[in-house]
């Protein structure tokens, strides 16, 4: 298995669920489900073929990889080749979870306060280019309203929520997920942007490096 492969491992478990390891992270629940000869992705709305073959005494799975190149660019999918390493049942696998320190006092920050609209999602702050979008699809987080005394409302494609998020200077805290995400405000070409470290399940369950939502100040 090569270190530079994005997908490192799959574990097919009961009830059609799939565990995955990506970018050398831990096994974790994925967006995939499976049925005979197919792996389904409920988020990307794709159905990928898999073919199992025995070659020279080893068992391999050829897994059709329908990434953004397929979804957004209509390119022909490549295949991941995975070697079977055991026949264990991973249905009771306990996912190791990261929890941040979240006990921070409120410190006011006038730069953070206001209404923000999501404009991009990037790997690093320095990779953001206001003229070229990095993210091809719809942005899950659509906006933030950073209010007085640590109150915060987030808006996603699923609606509005303010129950578990709070903020302090340079940070947004999720008490529900036990994460503390770095926020950095920058002015670029006369426009004010916030870079919000997105600590999703890829971070908490897989140990992957967080990427950043880029939000533009609109009020």
Image: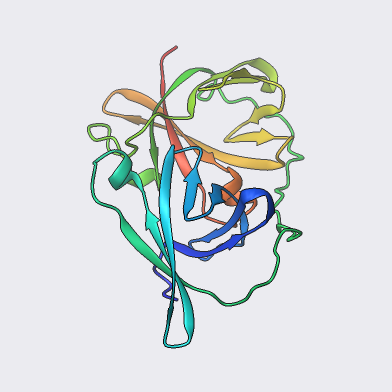
Task: Identify the colour scheme used.
Answer: rainbow
Q: Quadrant of the N terminus?
A: bottom left
Q: Is residue 87 above or below residue 46?
A: below
Q: Is residue 127 above or below residue 92?
A: above
Viewed as shown, does residue 38 lie left or right of 180?
left
Query: Farthest residue toward the top?
Result: 219
Viewer-side residue, 22 vs 41: 41
Viewed as shown, does residue 117 lie left or right of 199?
left
Q: Position of residue 67 (x, y in %)?
A: 36, 48
Viewer-side residue, 20 vs 200: 20
Q: Is residue 118 above or below residue 56?
A: above
Query: Farthest residue toward the bottom?
Result: 56
Which residue is found at the position 40% from the left and 37% from the top? Answer: 121
Viewer-side residue, 219 vs 177: 177
Viewed as shown, does residue 93 lie left or right of 140?
right
Q: Quadrant of the C terminus?
A: top left
Viewed as shown, does residue 175 lie left or right of 11?
right
Q: Position of residue 35 (x, y in %)?
A: 55, 50
Q: Which image quadrant for residue 11?
A: bottom right
Viewer-side residue, 170 vs 50: 50
Which residue is found at the position 64% from the left and 29% from the top? Answer: 167
Q: Position of residue 180 (x, y in %)?
A: 65, 41
Q: Position of residue 100 (x, y in %)?
A: 70, 48
Q: Which image quadrant for residue 102?
A: top right
Which residue is found at the position 47% from the left and 87% from the top? Answer: 57
Q: How many marks?
A: 0
Q: Is residue 197 above or below residue 219?
A: below
Which residue is found at the position 48% from the left and 29% from the top? Answer: 140
């Amino acid at each position: 298995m090569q270190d530079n492969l994005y997908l490192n491992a799959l574990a097919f478990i009961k009830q059609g669920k799939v565990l995955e390891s990506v970018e050398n992270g831990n096994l974790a629940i994925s967006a995939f489900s499976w049925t005979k000869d197919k792996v389904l992705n409920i988020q990307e709305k794709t159905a990928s073929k898999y073919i199992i073959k025995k070659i020279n005494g080893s068992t391999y799975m050829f897994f059709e990889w329908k990434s953004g190149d397929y979804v957004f660019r209509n390119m022909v999918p490549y295949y991941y080749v995975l070697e079977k390493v055991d026949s264990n049942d991973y249905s009771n696998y306990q996912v190791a979870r990261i929890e941040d320190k979240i006990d921070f006092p409120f410190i006011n920050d006038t730069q953070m306060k206001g209404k923000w609209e999501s404009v991009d999602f990037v790997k690093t702050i320095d990779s953001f280019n206001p003229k070229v979008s990095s993210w091809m699809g719809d942005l899950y987080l659509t906006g933030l309203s950073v209010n007085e005394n640590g109150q915060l409302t987030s808006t996603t494609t699923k609606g509005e929520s303010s129950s578990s998020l709070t903020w302090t200077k340079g940070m947004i805290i999720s008490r529900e997920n036990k994460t503390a995400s770095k926020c950095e405000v920058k002015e670029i070409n006369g426009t004010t942007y916030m870079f919000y470290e997105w600590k999703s399940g890829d971070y908490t369950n897989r140990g992957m490096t967080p990427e950043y939502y880029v939000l533009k100040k609109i009020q």
